[in-house]
Structure formats: C-alpha cells, structure tokens
Image (tube, rainbow, N blue to C red):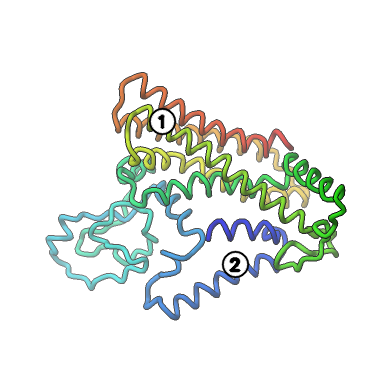
Amino acid sequence: AFILTTVYGQLISVYDYGRAAALILGGSTVAAMLVGFLYGRGKRVWCRHLCPVSGVFSLLARLAPVHYKVDEERWQANQGPHLPTPNCAPLIDIRRMQGNSDCHACGRCSGQRGAVALSARSPNQEILIVGNPPQHGHWDSTLLLFGMIGLAMGAFQWTVSPWFITLKQTAAEWLVDRDIFWPLEANAPWWLLTHYPQANDAFSWLDGAAILSYIGASSLVIGGALWLLLRGAVRLMNRGDNLFHHLALTLTPLGGAGLFLGLSATTIKLLRYEGFILAWAQPTRALMLAGAVAWSLYLAWQVISRHGANGMRRLTAFACVGLGTAVVGYGWYLQFWGWS
C-alpha cells in the first residue's frame, strides 16, 4: 500500500494539484471511514493494519523521546485504584507493551492499575533494547531499506534528475526510430497521469513509464545496495537474521530525515516562488543530513558492539554500515547540491 500510494501520487502530481490530493487523501479517508463503520467496533483497524503509512509511522515512533511506560509487575499485582479496562484503539496487549512502534499515544491507558505512565526516555532506547530481537522481523527492514529510503528517494529525485531526462530521451528516440508514436501522446485522464494542458503540464504515456522505471530502479538499486552491505556486515560477524534486522533499524534516523527533506522541498520551492530568500535552507539541510548519518552510525556501532565481535570484525562490519550511509547521503547530495 505504501508503494502504490507513493508511486500513484507521483504519476498524478499529488503535491501540485488539488484534485490529485483530494483523490488520494480523500479516497483513503473514505476508505478508513468505511472500514471503521463496517469492522472497527471502536478500534482503529484501518490505522493499525491498513493505512499505507502505518508502517512508516511505526518505524519513526521508535525514535520518540517519550512513551507510555508499562510496569508489568505492578500491572499483574492489580492493586488499586481499579480503573475500567482501557479501550485500546490499536489493539495492543498493554500489559506486555515494551516499545512505542504500535502505540498511538492516545492516553486511554494512562494510569491504569498505576502501572502505565507517560515517561521520558532516550530516543535510542527502542532500537537498541526493544529492537533486539526485532518485533516485526523482515517487514520492518524491507520497508525501511526499499521503501522509506530507496523508493522515497526515487520519488523525490526524478523531477530534478538528469538521469531521468536521459532515460526518457533515449526511450523517445528508440520509439521514433521505429515509428511508434502513441506512447508520446499526452491523452491520459488526470486521475491516471497528470493532465492539465491549461497549465502546460501533461504527462505522456512515456512519461508515466519513465517515472515508474526510475522510481522502481531507485528502490531496487539503493535498497539492494543497503541490503547487501548489511548482509556483508552480518556475515563478517558470523551472526544470523536477528542481527541483520536489528542493524537495519539503525538506519531509521536516516530514513526519517530523508522523508523530511524530500517532503519539505516542495514547501521551500513554493516559498521561494513567493519571494522568500530562505538562505538558511541549504545549510539546514546539510546539518540535518549530517546529523542523521551520525545518529545512524552511532546506533549501528552500539548494535554491533552488543552482538559481540572482536576488534577487526567489528570495524569491518561498521565500515559496511558506514558505506551504506554514504550511499544514501550521496543520493540526497545529488538532489540538493549536485543537480541544483
């Protein structure tokens, strides 16, 4: 659902036109209302299991500096005050809740049996401690590597990428040489491909195919590179899948920073069109990207150390993760500095 929503949004220019935004956001809102009416029974079935971005929010929530901390021993003691059983909207087993990834922080369970309280914590805690072993296994690592990082980068990059232009021009020349002209026509409806001729903005079928190809290739190349590098680190340390998934979670700060940089790019572009200089934007982007890389590297070093390895194995495994962060960082460098 995350992949389909992201790609479809790019095909119909969801960030640029009201009808496209209404179709995707309004359509998902109607779907959520129908699911809630038919199956919800007072629970957040859509938000927990069906929302396209629930997995992304689940990953980012691991970095939250506050959470609802549960004292399981106190819960089991069941001492007063005896409050009614809370209606947990996302259907969590509150007594055994350790992390923040599934919790919606609605506060309904706060104070229950004197064992649940909103508490401050280190933003690193859930990834370093609760994330070992990972709760959701390969689903979290797959979404993070291929979705939040690889797919998202391709979706944000294609509008400024010279590689995309080369891809499209090469395909167009190949089609023209063979007298195949229908892919060059811009006659698709607006809800399938961007079609606003009054704004001189209409995608041809070739544009749509090129966008799909670029985003797909970005997801596979970047996500695949990260997957191979992390697998290499695990192999160097002679550990199993638990370390791989745990190590993948250390890239969550980098994935979250990339989403913020990409989504805020439209806002900054629109503000500049209105005459705002925003000289601080580029230095702020650099600081955010550098901070995210440093945070991910710190988490990776801690995870590698916790899983145990001698000095050389530890350093080589860490070098694999470092190379992965460099790949992601270089991709964002190209978008905001190299191609601008």
The numbered dot on residue 35 is none
Is label 2 in a helix, a strand or a loop?
A: helix
Rendered location of residue 234, percent (x, y): 38, 33
Question: As rendered, which of 83 and 214 lies closer to the eye?
Answer: 214
The numbered dot on residue 233 is 1
Is label 1 in a helix, a strand or a loop?
A: helix
Q: Quadrant of residue 70?
A: bottom left
Q: Which is more N-terminal, label 2 or label 1?
A: 2
Rendered location of residue 170, percent (x, y): 79, 43
Question: For the residue carrying disc 1, how many other residues have a C-alpha within 10 Å: few (<14), some (14-19), or many (20+)?
Answer: many
**Residue sitting at x 42%, y 64%:** 49
Q: Which amino acid type corresponds to the residue marked 1 in the rendered image?
A: Ala
Question: For the residue carrying disc 2, how many other residues have a C-alpha within 10 Å: few (<14), some (14-19), or many (20+)?
Answer: some
Rendered location of residue 204, percent (x, y): 79, 58
Rendered location of residue 144, percent (x, y): 48, 47
Contact flag, marks 1 and 2 (Cβ < 8 Å): no
Question: As rendered, which of 39 and 79 lies closer to the eye?
Answer: 39
Which residue is situated farthest in the top direction here?
312
Q: Mark 1 to mark 2: distance in Å?
A: 40 Å
**Residue sitting at x 21%, y 58%:** 115
**Residue sitting at x 36%, y 69%:** 89
Q: Which amino acid type corresponds to the residue marked 2 in the rendered image?
A: Leu
Question: As rendered, which of 68 and 175 lies closer to the eye?
Answer: 175
Q: Quadrant of residue 243?
A: top left
- What residue would you read off at disc 2? 25
- Of labels 1 and 2, the one closer to you: 1
Which residue is situated farthest in the bottom direction here?
38
Give the quadrant of the C terminus. top right
